[in-house]
Amino acid sequence: MKVQKKMMGITLFAMVALSAAACGTNGQPPASEITRQAGDISTPEQTSYASLYQTSVFLGDSITEGLSYHDVLKEKNVLAGAGKTAEFALEDVDELVKRKPEHIFIQLGSDDILWPTDHPKEYSLSYYAKLIDRIKERLPEASITILSVTPVTDKAEKAEPRYQNIGDYNKGLKELASKVQVGYIDVSSIVADRPEMYDADGIHFQAQFYPVLLDYIKDELGRKKIAK
C-alpha cells in the first residue's frame, strides 16, 4: 500500500507538470526525490498529531499533501494534491462535507500565483472567497482557518520570479480572511531560520517541517483563543 501511495503521488506530479507545459507555463516544480526518501515521523509523534487534529481536515496543494505523505497525519485528515488551486479546490467540497470536520485549514496559493492569467492574485482570491462561502454553506458549524503560502528559497525565486509575489498574495489572504470572517495564520516565520527543512527544489519541504507546522498552528490557535 505504501509503494502504491508513492507511485500514485509521483504519477500525479508528472501529470501536473505535463499539463503546465501544455499550457505554455512553467508550473510549480514537483517535489524532488529527497522528499520521497525515507524519514517518516515516528509512531509516537504520528499518534500525537493524529489525535490533536483528529477532527480537522487540511485542504491544500502538494505542500499540504506532505502532511499525509510523510505520515504526520492520517489521510482522512488531509484533502490535498499537486497543482491544486482555489478554483480546483471547489471540486473537493463534496468530499470535505463527507468527512464532517470541525476545523478546516486551507493552504492554497503556491500554484495560484503561477496561473497563466493577467491578474493571478485577483483571479485566485475570487475563487478563494467562493470556496469559503461554499464551505460555510455546506458546513456551517465548522471553523475555518486560512494558512499563508510558505515562502521559497532565493534560488527558487530566481528560477521562477513569480514567487516574488508570495508576500503580496499573503496580504491578500489576510484581508480576505478578515472580510469573510475566518481565521488566518501566517506560517512564514517557521522556515525563516530553518532552511534545512526545504526540499532540494526550494519550494517543498522535508518530513521534519510538518510537525513544526502543526505545533505552530496549535500554539497560534491557543494564543488567539486566550486573546478573545
Image (tube, grey):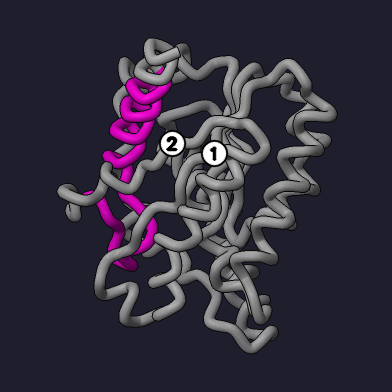
Give the residue at mark 2: 185
Name the spot of residue 166 as percent of width and height, x first. 43, 63
Residue 182's tag is none
Quarter where residue 97 is shown: top right
Residue 55 magenta-highlighted:
no
Q: Is residue 154 left or right of residue 18?
A: left
Q: Amino acid at mark 2?
A: Ile
Q: Residue at x 77, y 29 (%)?
A: 136
Residue sitting nearer the eye, 119 or 82: 119
Q: Residues within 10 Å of mark 1 (few under 14, many from 20)?
A: many
Q: Quadrant of the C terminus?
A: top left
Where residue 189 appears, as percent x and y from the top left, is 27, 45
Percent position (x, y) of residue 51?
Answer: 46, 12
Any magenta on residue 204?
A: yes
Query: Is the Cβ of the residue at disc 1 closer than 8 Å to that at disc 2?
Result: yes
User: Is residue 7 visible to us here?
Assistant: no
Residue hosting label 1: 146
Name which residue lies at 21% across and 51% down: 192
Residue 31, above or below 118: above
Mark 1: amino acid: Ile
**Mark 2 secondary-structure assignment:** strand
Q: Is residue 146 above or below residue 162?
A: above
Relative to 154, is 158 above or below?
Answer: below
| Magenta region, residue range | 197-221
Q: Position of residue 221 (x, y in %)?
A: 42, 21
Give the distance between the C-alpha atoms of the residues marked 1 and 2, in whole angstroms: 6 Å
